Amino acid sequence: MKRFFIVVLLGLIWTVHAEEDRKTILFLGDSLTAGYGLDKTQAFPALIQAKIDSLGWAFDVVNGGLSGETSAGGLRRVNWLLRREIDVLVLALGGNDGLRGIPTTEMQQNLQGIIDRAKEKYPDIQIILMGIEAPPNLGDTYTTAFRAVFPALSEKNRVPLIPFLLEGVGGVPELNLPDRIHPNAEGHRIIVETVWRVLKPILESGEK
């Protein structure tokens, strides 16, 4: 009886240590990240988790997407999200700033603020920045300035950049919902591959 108890206890201890060894990836974004119009299991963060699980890697994905979120909103709630230890932050905000015509300098300050807070809380955190495009009806001056924000932040903070989250998906009717803004399930599967090209090497290094 005592031997059985010891075996069970050791099993519990191993389980606790295994859970403690797992790392966390936070996707901080808007409706594109949240999987607007779809079941959350069809959104690209959940599909990334499935890829990770298939490889047996010890990473948990947290979907921090919120429909309608702007860079300012992300900055307001990032401290709450960082209460959980985060090892990798995938920052995917800015789309709603563009839709609202928010000044690009303001958006850049907000995104920089999120990066600064994440690094301050977790100095070893790995950050990936996702770019997005502003709608063309806002004019060339705004769209050019908007597009320039993401590479500027990437260079300043020395973090990898995915230039366009919706690469191969944006503007393709059959890959989007009827609103022609939000990707459908097939669109999210394409986004996974765009993200995975940059995320996979970071996770591989964390597994070593």
Image (cartoon, rainbow, N blue to C red):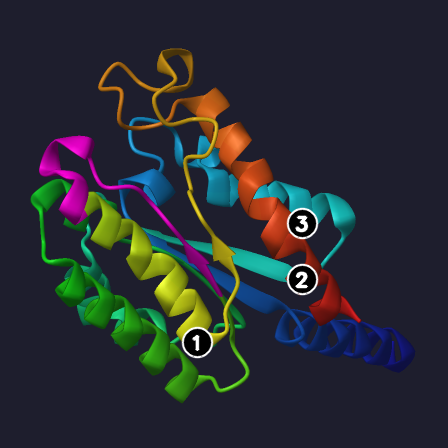
Give the image location of residue 168, x and y in percent. Answer: 48, 27
Q: Is residue 49 visible?
A: no
Is residue 60 toward the left or the right of residue 171 in the image? right
Tag nearer the camera, 1 or 3 = 1
Amino acid under disc 2: Leu
Disc 3 + disc 2, Cβ < 8 Å: yes
Q: What element carries label 3?
A: helix
Amino acid under disc 3: Ile
Q: Name the residue under label 3.
A: 52
Mark drawn on residue 203: 2
Q: Give the range drawn in magenta.
A: 128-142
Q: Name the residue under label 1.
A: 157
Rendered view: 122 above or below 107: below
Q: Distance between the residues labelled 2 and 1?
A: 19 Å
- Outermost residue, right direction? 3
**Crowd band around label 1 with a 10 angstrom C-alpha radius: few (<14), some (14–19), many (20+):** some
Image quarter hosting the N terminus: bottom right
Q: Distance between the residues labelled 3 and 2?
A: 9 Å
Rendered view: 188 above or below 7: above
Q: What element carries label 1?
A: helix
Q: Quadrant of residue 181?
A: top left
